[in-house]
Structures are given as structure tokens and as C-alpha cells.
Image (cartoon, rainbow, N blue to C red):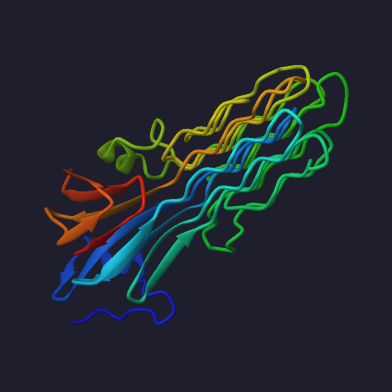
Amino acid sequence: MTPVQSLKTGLITGSMLAGNPTFGTYIGADVLVVAGGAGGGGKAGGGGGAGGLRSSSSVFNKGTTYTVTVGAGGTAGNGSGSRGGAGNASSVIGGSISFSSSAGGSGGGRDGAGNGLTGGSGGGASGGGTGGAGNSGGFSPAEGNNGAGGVEGAPGYSGGGGGGAGAVGGTGTNTTPGNGGAGNGDFSSWASATSSGSSGYYAGGGGAGNLSGSGSSGGSGGGGNAASNGTANTGGGGGGHSGSDGGLAGAGGSGIVIFRVAGSVTAASTTGSPTRYETGGYSYYKFTGNGSITF
């Protein structure tokens, strides 16, 4: 029996695809799509928001080429107080399928751009600012969480942490900048199978900075510590700049796209040099850059 596809997205529920079966001209596959994290803000800045994280069990047409976009991380804010750059969206598009996750929201900088911005997970704010909202795509379940606000008070004037896929960012205090929100650990088996993620997590928020130079921690899943970059191919947010000098904040980490199919399955063709893994009864294709796949 040919499975019914949604006219809107081409997706059906995971329960309908238990075991990722093959239906003649169709094949069932699970997909993890993580967008690029945002950069942290400059000069006691907020942490960058993690890239949005979404997963789906989908029906793919054999012979149809599906284009994979892996979002780059956002640029770092600088010591003059600029806001970090937003991340970039990741997606899988082809046939009737159009599935994407939203870019991480920028971390706020101290001078004139203090609020964190909305994104897959929201960016943290510099001292006195408001954190950005997460889940900018309006998805259910949510692709990410809010960034936190900062505190405009001596001696630290601390920023707030960027939101992560698993938790909101930490709010800064007068003396201590906020930590980045934790990422999502529900795909630890995928991370282990494909040598990806960070300790089994993806999409952690960036830690914030303050004027006193105190550091904070990025969220599990590649979020950068204060003034440190998010980890590549995790969607982690960059850490906010810490200190009153002219140094840089951290840049956001790039995203990742992974396909998982039950059994020993080899794609008919790929571009972009994804890495194939076969373990635990599944075949995986890991994309760390743009490309395509045809089953």
C-alpha cells in the first residue's frame, strides 16, 4: 500500500514509519536538521542563540534528489559593542518535502545594540537588555528556547546567556554573566554513531560576558564559553565578549543535517561528500556542508 503524504509538507508521523520501511518507490528515513548558531555580542555581550533543532520521520521518493543546506554560524561581535551576527538556516528540500530549522538569534552588544534577537534559539542580551525569543519558526515541538536578559549594574554589567535547544539561557547578575542554555540530548545515539555533536548534545547556547572579564560557560551541545566560538557542526551559539577591551566575542558554530535509515541502505547518489556510517541496525548520512542525496 502506498503511504499517504501530506500535501503541505510531504511528512508523516514517526509512528506510521516505525522501522523506516521501504515502500516500493518510497523509503522511510529519519532526519535531524540543526541550523547554524549565532555569534555572541561584543563588549560584555550576550551569548549567541543556538541554531534551531528539528527532527522528522519522512517519506522520500526514490529517484528524487533532495537538496541539503547546512547553515553557517554567525559572525562574532567586536569589542566596540556590536551585536553578533545571526546564524543561517538548515534545510532538506525536494519533491513534496520542505523541512527546515531556523537560524540562531544574535547575542546583544553593549553599545547601542543591547537586546538579543529572535531565532531558532534566542540570543542573550548585554547588560540591561532583553533576551531574544526562541522558536522563531513557530514549530511544535519547539526548535529552541529564549535567550536571557542582562543586568546593568556594577561591578560586572553582565550579559545573559543565549538560548539552547534544550533550555533557556541563564540570566546575568551584577557579578556573574549568564551561562548558555543547554542543548538537546535526545539524539545521543545519533551523535555516537556519526561522531558528531558534543558529548551527545546538539545546539547549546553561548555563554555571556561582562565588563569585569568574568567568563561563563556555554551550554552543552557546542555552545561557546565567554569570548569563545561555538563548536562547528553542532549549531552552538558563540560566547559573548568579556572585558572592557577591544577583543572579539565568539562566532557561532555551523549546523548539521543527518539522515538515518533502518538496515543496510546505500544512497543512489550524493553530492557534497556526506559521510556514511552503518551501525546498530541503521545507515546514517552525515552532512557537514551543503550537498544533496538521492535514494
* Residue 278 on image: x %, y %: 16, 45
**Quarter of the image that includes the C terminus:** bottom left
Q: Count all numbered tags in the image, as a single digit.
A: 0
Task: Place residue 31 in its image quadrant.
Answer: bottom left
- Is residue 40 rendered to the left or right of residue 278? right
- Is residue 1 rendered to the left or right of residue 37? left
Q: Give the residue at x 57% y 62%.
A: 137
Task: Place residue 186 in its image quadrant.
Answer: top left
Q: Give the residue at x 25% y 79%.
A: 3
Picture layout, residue 99 above or below residue 25: above
* Residue 254 on image: x %, y %: 46, 42
Picture layout, residue 158 above or below residue 263: above
* Residue 18 on image: x %, y %: 25, 63
Task: Place residue 65 in its image quadrant.
Answer: bottom left
Q: Give the residue at x 16% y 76%.
A: 25
- Is residue 283 rendered to the left or right of residue 55? left
**Quarter of the image that includes the N terminus:** bottom left
Between residue 244 and residue 137, name the one nearer to us: 244
Between residue 161 and residue 38, name the one nearer to us: 38
Picture layout, residue 237 above or below residue 56: above
Picture layout, residue 200 above or below residue 20: above
Q: Give the residue at x 60% y 39%.
A: 39
* Residue 76 on image: x %, y %: 61, 35
